[in-house]
Image (tube, rainbow, N blue to C red):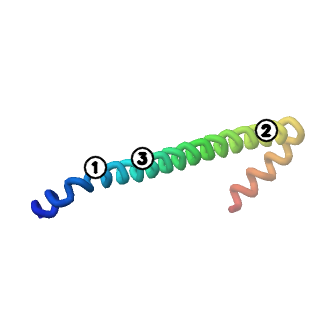
Amino acid sequence: MLVNREGLKNKEPHYERYSFTVNSKVAVVVVVVVVVVVVVVVVVVVVVVVVSSLLIFIIIVVDKNIVRVLTCSLCES
């Protein structure tokens, strides 16, 4: 192994540069994927909270009987 490494000394810098570019590309892809996933999760949570709060507000303001129906159906299930 030592002989092989000494024999490949001229190729090692090129190989290191190539592996560094591959690693940096992989790192960039991973960072982009993580950022996209975090943004999607945050958007979904915000939309769910806003929609659920609006629905609850509309149900409470418009008709209180719907709340009773919903709670009864939840209790039955």
Q: Earlier in the sequence, mark 1 or mark 3?
A: 1
Query: Which residue shows up at 20% across the image and 59% down it?
Result: 8
- Give the number of the disc on residue 13: 1
Answer yes or no: do the residues labelled 3 and 2 have beta carbons within 8 Å? no
Q: Amino acid at mark 3?
A: Ser
Q: Earlier in the sequence, mark 3 or mark 2?
A: 3
Q: For this rendering, which residue is in front, 54 or 14?
A: 14
Where does residue 1 sit, x and y in percent of width and height? 12, 64
**Separation (CA) of disc 1 from disc 3:** 16 Å
Where does residue 54 sit, x and y in percent of width and height? 79, 38
Mark 3 lies on a secondary structure that is: helix
Where does residue 71 sit, x and y in percent of width and height? 74, 50
Query: Which residue shows up at 44% across the image and 52% down it?
Result: 26
**Separation (CA) of disc 3 from disc 2:** 45 Å
Where does residue 75 sit, x and y in percent of width and height? 69, 56
Q: Amino acid at mark 1?
A: Pro
Q: For this rendering, which residue is in front, 36 or 49?
A: 36
In the image, 23: left or right of 76? Answer: left
58 in relation to 3, above or below: above
8 in relation to 24, above or below: below
**Separation (CA) of disc 2 from disc 1:** 61 Å
Give the crowd class for mark 3: few <14, some 14-19, many >=20 residues within 10 Å.
few
In the image, 39: left or right of 75? Answer: left
Q: Where does the C terminus fall, quadrant-wise? A: bottom right
Query: Which residue shows up at 42% across the image and 46% down it?
Result: 24
- Give the number of the disc on residue 24: 3
Q: Earlier in the sequence, mark 2 or mark 1?
A: 1
- Quick one: which residue is furthest to the right in this view? 62
The residue that disc 2 covers is 54
- Give the number of the disc on residue 43: none
